[in-house]
Structures are given as structure tokens and as C-alpha cells.
Amino acid sequence: MKTEFKTPKGLFWELKREFNFTLDVCALSWNAQCKSYFTPEDNGLLKKWSGVCWCNPPFDKTQGQWVRKAWEEAQNGCTVVLLFPGNYHDTQWFHRFALRSSEIRYFRGRPKFKNKSGKENAMRCILLVFRPGCSGPPEVSSITRDGAQYNFEAVENPATNAGSQPGKK
């Protein structure tokens, strides 16, 4: 049985504030993040993307196809932010396309996704950012599971930074 999840609200809004997305290229009507979106019936892998795209594709064997498509659309002028499981770094497609992205953002902690009935599932993920014409190597950074920049200094020297680190486990 296939289960679909919605991108965590805090994570998406943090990224939306930064990127101002115009198109969700892989959505269902109940979990679409933008007014304009492609459903499985539209097949975003076959459509032309435009603007600033959000992509949270199925966490399945099609991951490489979505990463490749994101890179190709960036070569055609789009900005694409793509969320995918963090356990594909040994694949050919990861080395061929993800390492040619503009950025790789590693999560500190696992974002908590909800399915249509509200059940939560924390998943290990990576965020790729493809900017127009990107060719790598990507900048690498760390973010909290809510998408904010991870503050290493707060962790290394907690006495000087009173606030707790959001998303820290």
C-alpha cells in the first residue's frame, strides 16, 4: 500500500519565505503547496516547469528521475528546490545530478510528515537547490528539520547562546 505525505508546514513556510515558490511540480490536490501544481495525472516529469518550483516527489524508485528533471529544468532557467530521502548518496544519479546542484542542505533531525489522515512519520531527508544554469559543485549547509539555518555555535557553546536549537534531537 502506497502512503502519501504532506511536507511539514513549518519546513515549507520557511523555504517559501526564502524562495517564493510559484509551482508545485509533484502534488496531490490535498497536499499541494502552491496554487499552481502538477498531479500524478499531469505527470510533472513530462511537463515543462517554470518559475520557482517546489518538488517533494514520492519517496520511491523514481527519485533519480525527479533529481535529473530538476537539474534539466534549472538548465532551462528554473529554480527548483527538491526534498528527497537522505539515503541515495551512493547512486549514479546522485553523483551525476545532485552533485551538480547549487546547494545541498542536510537536515539536523528528521522532518515529520503527515499523511492524509494526520498520522506522522519522521523521515531522513536532504534538500537540493537547483538554480538556473547550475553545474556544481554544490554549497553544503545544515538546516533544522523546520528548514532554518542550523546554528553550530549554539550547540558548541550553549552558555553564550541561551536559546535552544529548533529541531535539535
Image (cartoon, grey):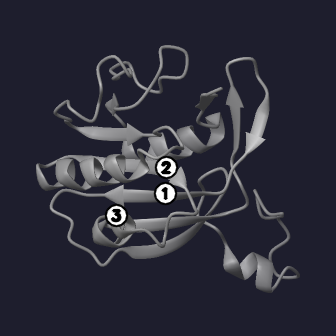
Residue linked to disc 2 = 83
Q: Amino acid at mark 1?
A: Leu
Q: Amino acid at mark 2?
A: Leu
Q: Is residue 24 above or below residue 70?
A: above
Of pointers 1 and 3, the one earlier in the residue sequence: 3
Of pointers 3 and 2, the one earlier in the residue sequence: 2
Residue linked to disc 1 = 127
Q: Amino acid at mark 3?
A: Trp
Residue linked to disc 3 = 93
User: Observer-nearest residue: 51 or 56?
Assistant: 56
Left or right: 135, with 157 as reference point: left
Do tag 1 and tag 2 residues touch (Cβ < 8 Å)? yes
Alpha carbon separation for disc pair 3 and 2: 15 Å
- Which image quadrant: the N terminus? top right
Residue 40 image offset from top left, x and y in percent: 38, 22
Report helix, strand or loop for mark 3.
helix
